[in-house]
Image (spheres, rainbow, N blue to C red):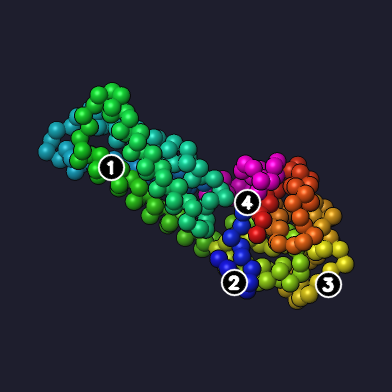
């Protein structure tokens, strides 16, 4: 979402190699793990409900084949595993944006391929009525469930909960713009607790926003420790080039700190 000339469509960077891999999660924050656990439960319940609906619709006449009872029972496990394989439980894709839902849709395509391969390998003639109900309903209910869970997260964030403590690195004006935008849009889940500016730079309005300046770019790691931040957001700045950003990433690795490159 863009506002005030600052984009917070961020590219997340891992601390062990900032351009590669997923970020290391801080050990001191547990609400994100609870959020992911809630998604796993919601996805499993969605698949179970879809399987039950498909079973009821297809075999409502009294016939109850054991194969489809088994399929209904294992569908939640297979679905959660497929969604996980498509990285739809990675925290960087959750809470905002459409990437989470795109990955769920990709998982649905995978599930169709898995069912088709299973049927071919074991020479099974699966009932089309069951498959045509179970798979689309699983996908649809999962998307609705995730949307509901996301809105609950947004409500908690609007209350000041489930926030990531962020130190922003960049020019003062850009930092001020980002702080104002994040305060207008708390659903992003970023609480700015401090800033680091280029050496000798003016604060340019940060005092009015009550954002403490922890120092210059050489003191980012110390500021993170002092303010107990779990995330560093780096804005476009000529002083923070690629090599310097890599060095910062390696320096923060020991803290398990996320780096967001705006």
- Callout 4 touching callout 2 (CB < 8 Å): no
Q: Residue, x 80% and y 60% (percent of image)? A: 239
Distance between the alpha carbons at the discs numbered 2 and 1 = 42 Å
User: Of the residues tagged 4 and 1, which is closer to the observer?
Assistant: 4
Instruction: Point out the image quarter for the C terminus.
Output: bottom right
Label disc, if present, on residue 3 of the rendered structure: 2
Q: In the rendered structure, which segment of residues is drawn in magenta?
A: 12-35
Question: Can you identify the residue that label 4 sits on?
Answer: 12
**Residue 184 visible to the viewer:** no
Displayed quadrant of residue 190: bottom right
Question: Can you identify the residue that label 3 sits on?
Answer: 202
Question: Can you identify the residue that label 1 sits on?
Answer: 134
Q: Residue furthest right?
A: 200
Residue 27 is a magenta residue: yes
Query: Helix or strand or loop: what does disc 2 sit on?
Result: strand
Residue 252 is a magenta residue: no
Query: Helix or strand or loop: what does disc 4 sit on?
Result: strand
């Amino acid at each position: 979402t863009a506002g005030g000339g600052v984009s917070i469509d961020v590219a997340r960077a891992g601390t062990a190699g900032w351009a590669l891999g997923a970020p290391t999660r801080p050990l001191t924050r547990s609400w994100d793990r609870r959020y992911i656990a809630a998604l796993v439960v919601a996805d499993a319940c969605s698949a179970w409900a879809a399987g039950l609906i498909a079973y009821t619709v297809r075999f409502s006449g009294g016939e109850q084949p054991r194969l489809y009872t088994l399929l209904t029972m294992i569908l939640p496990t297979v679905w959660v595993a497929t969604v996980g394989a498509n990285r739809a439980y990675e925290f960087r894709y959750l809470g905002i944006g459409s990437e989470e839902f795109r990955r769920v849709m990709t998982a649905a395509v995978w599930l169709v391929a898995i069912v088709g391969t299973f049927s071919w390998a074991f020479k099974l003639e699966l009932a089309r009525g069951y498959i045509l109900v179970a798979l689309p309903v699983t996908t649809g209910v999962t998307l609705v469930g995730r949307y509901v869970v996301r809105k609950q997260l947004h409500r908690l964030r609007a209350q000041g909960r489930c926030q990531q403590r962020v130190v922003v690195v960049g020019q003062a004006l850009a930092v001020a713009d980002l702080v104002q935008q994040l305060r207008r849009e708390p659903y992003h889940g970023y609480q700015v607790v401090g800033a680091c500016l280029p050496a000798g730079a003016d604060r340019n309005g940060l005092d009015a926003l009550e954002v403490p300046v922890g120092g210059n770019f050489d003191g980012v790691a110390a500021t993170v420790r002092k303010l107990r931040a779990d995330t560093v957001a780096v804005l476009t700045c000529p002083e923070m080039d690629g090599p310097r950003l890599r060095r910062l990433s390696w320096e923060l690795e020991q803290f398990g700190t996320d780096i967001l490159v705006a």
